[in-house]
Image (cartoon, helix red, strand yellow):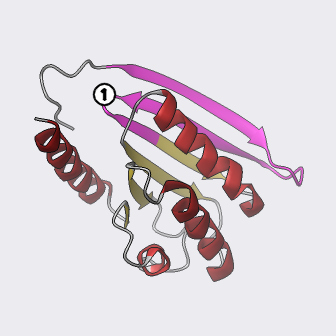
Amino acid sequence: MSQPDDFPKKKQSRTITTINRAGLRPYRLHIDIEGQQLRVKLDGHWAFRDSNSFWQRIFDECRANSLNFAVVMFQFSKKMSIQESHALAGRAIEIFSGQGIQLAIVDINRCSFASPSFWNRVSGNESFSTFFQDMAEAEAWLDKKVLEFSNKES
């Protein structure tokens, strides 16, 4: 991802392995900060009732690091149901809507969500997030958003 020359490049990385509240197999949350962007990857077995703390953590990471852009990658070990997908998308909308943070949501293994278009249907006309099944498309969308943001700041 290209960045303005005067923007300080920062890189942080950590992985959090957690046993979910039900005591099931662990899921891993990988958090990276690259330049102007938070990059989060969630994989393994997910306890879907954890969506509130998951999205709040992403929001808090963005705010703590003054970031307006995030790519959130999902790679679950089993497909979510329509209800689970709805709850996950709905909670993201509640937390991020109107907050000035742009989210690129990526289903890396193309099978974590029940339907590729489900995220966009749940979010309705909200323009802060878009769902992708291709990382290159997500990166291009974020590049466009970063450029628009940089032009507004100039």
x then y, percent, for residue 134: 32, 61
Magenta segment, principal secondary structure? strand
Say above or below: 112 vs 4.
Answer: below
Residue under the point 13% across and 28% down: 4
Residue found farthest to the right: 23
Picture quadrant where residue 60 is located:
top right
Q: Indicate left or right for 116 with 19 as reference.
A: left
The residue closer to the viewer here, 144 or 12, is: 144
116 in the magenta segment: no
Residue under the point 60% across and 73% down: 85
The residue closer to the viewer here, 109 or 34, is: 34
Span shown in magenta:
10-39
Q: Residues within 10 Å of mark 1 (few under 14, many from 20)?
A: some
Q: Indicate left or right for 31 with 86 as reference.
A: left
Say above or below: 34 vs 78.
Answer: above
Q: Secondary structure at mark 1?
A: loop
Q: The N terminus is located in which quarter?
A: top left
Look at the image and tell me whether residue 74 can be seen: yes
Q: Indicate left or right for 140 with 90 as reference.
A: left
Amino acid carrying mark 1 in the image: Gly
The residue closer to the viewer here, 38 or 42, is: 38
x then y, percent, for residue 78: 65, 67
Look at the image and tell me whether residue 45 can be seen: no
21 in the magenta segment: yes
Picture quadrant where residue 34 is located:
top left
Q: The C terminus is located in which quarter?
A: top left
Residue under the point 48% across and 35% down: 63
The residue closer to the viewer here, 34 or 78, is: 34
How many labels sit on residues? 1
Q: Which residue is mark 1?
A: 35
Residue under the point 30% across and 56% down: 138
x then y, percent, for residue 66: 40, 30
